[in-house]
Amino acid sequence: MSAPPMRPDVAAYVAADNAIARPRLHDMPVDVARRVVRRLARKTDLPLQPVAVDRWLEVPLAEDGTIGLRLFDTVANRLPGPAILYFHGGGWVLGDVDIYAPVCAEIARALDLPVLSVEYRRAPEHPSPTGQMDCEAAARWIATTPSALPITPTSLILAGDSCGGAYAISTAMALRDAPAAIPVASQLIFYPSADIATRYPSFREFATGYLLDKHLMRWFAEHFRPDDTDFRASPMAGKLEGLPPALVVTTQLDPLRDQGRAFAAALEQAGVSVIAHEAAGMTHGFLTMRAAIPSAQAELEAILAMFRKLIPPR
């Protein structure tokens, strides 16, 4: 069976990337791969547009120490209301808050909501389930409206992409089972690694040649060392009943496509309100490729327009 067609701008970028003779990320030491990804993101994504608030905060951890949290907001003095907590992608190993600053600022502008982007700890220095525990700790800290937080959230919207999408789901599950000081209102999930225990057909269909490939995914797993029976690494290992409404975005040309589809279907079966949207002709990771793939910006705008119906009244 032939693969679905790519959008012209996706095809051009993927062809150019595949044609470059260079070491691939999975052949590099982790620190080198991180530097390469940061440089690449400056070329592939749109630049960070100024917002009224762009501020770093620190979330205290139970075992001492802190993790970073970057707040983006379009107004300097916001009335109480929902706040978005964003967990970035990067295969548990790569990616960081700075790489995702342009898209987080764009989400804040498009939805007129504050976005708090979490700098959770990454593997291999901190293997599973440390990253998810950091995400949960950040959500619980924000929910208490500490004095260091310059906004007053009345509910949380958990959002993320790829492994960060899985962290958003698993954090919603943790806060369902032991509620935080304010409720989780909804989830905005982009191409998640929702079920790492199952080998879906899309793993084989898009194993190589579509940016995210089997070699890189294997490299991620070797560093992260996930337990696929633990919902903190593989959310579909847990119970889905009682989760907040979700918009689940999949990308058609993506090895993770089928587990995202399976997650959306499982939510519906569990009685959770869900909107499933698939970006036709698009590859994994488009959120940080809006300069290299111009149609990715329009795709994001359409998704955020769909998501507005899941934002609680202010």
Image: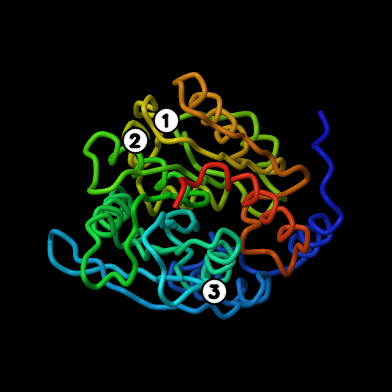
Where is residue 3, by image quadrant? top right
Is residue 191 among what the camera can see? yes
User: Which circle's residue, 2 or 1, is located before the other in the chain?
Assistant: 2
Instruction: Report, in whole angstroms, how far the alpha carbon at label 3 lies from the one at label 2.
Output: 29 Å
Between disc 3 and disc 1, the foreground one is 1
The three-letter amino acid code for the residue at tag 1 is Met
Which quarter of the rendered picture does the N terminus lie within? top right
Q: Nearer the viewer, residue 251 or 21?
A: 251
Mark 3 packing: few (<14 Cα in 10 Å), some, or many (20+)? some
For the point 41% across and 43% down, the residue is: 185
Mark 2 packing: few (<14 Cα in 10 Å), some, or many (20+)? many
The label number, if any, that marks residue 38 in the structure image:
3
Instruction: Locate residue 113, reporting x and y percent.
Output: 49, 61
For the point 39% across and 54% down, the residue is: 223
The label number, if any, that marks residue 231 in the structure image:
2
Q: Which residue is mark 1?
A: 236
User: Which circle's residue, 3 or 1, is located before the other in the chain?
Assistant: 3
Name, please, the residue furthest toward the left: 63
Q: Is residue 68 above or below residue 277?
A: below
